[in-house]
Image: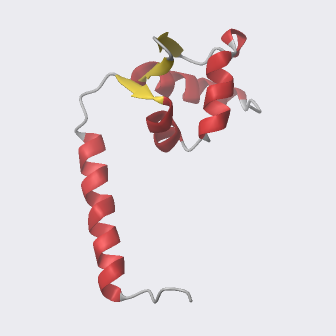
Amino acid sequence: MPSKVTEESILEQLQKNIKEAIKEAMDPKLTLTIEEAAKYSGIGRDKLLELAHNPDSGFPAFRVGTKFLISRELLKEWLKKVAEERKVL
């Protein structure tokens, strides 16, 4: 049975989203994980992993042990470049 959406549940979710947005805006981290970059960019996690594994993609990822990290500033620049070139990923 589908759950009933109430004004209270919408308000709770909105408050949660606002808190997350404030936290992200004030986040001093210079790097993002693949999951954080996916959320930040709107590009799917699997696609970002594919780009990170391909050194010819120009995607600004680097490895630390077994995980990829992405420079926040370089990601912004990369997204701008991809958008300007109207590249299909």
Which residue of the protein is positioned furthest toward the right in this rendering? 88
Horizontally, is 56 left or right of 3 in the view? right
Split into 4 quadrants, where in the image is the C terminus? top right
Residue 50: image quadrant is top right
Horizontally, is 52 left or right of 68 in the view? right
Expressed as whole percent of the image width and height from the top left, the position of residue 78 reads: 56, 23
The image's colouring method is secondary structure
**Eyeballing the image, is 75 above or below 10?**
above
Horizontally, is 45 left or right of 77 in the view? right
Asked whether 3 or 73 is in front, the reply is 3
Horizontally, is 77 left or right of 23 in the view? right
Expressed as whole percent of the image width and height from the top left, the position of residue 28 reads: 24, 28
Tell me which residue sits at (50%, 31%) in the image: 34
Expressed as whole percent of the image width and height from the top left, the position of residue 6 reads: 38, 88
Asked whether 33 or 11 is in front, the reply is 33
Tell me which residue sits at (56%, 89%) in the image: 1
How many numbered tags mark residues here?
A: 0
Tell me which residue sits at (29%, 62%) in the image: 16
Expressed as whole percent of the image width and height from the top left, the position of residue 74 reads: 47, 19
Tell me which residue sits at (67%, 34%) in the image: 47
Residue 19: image quadrant is bottom left
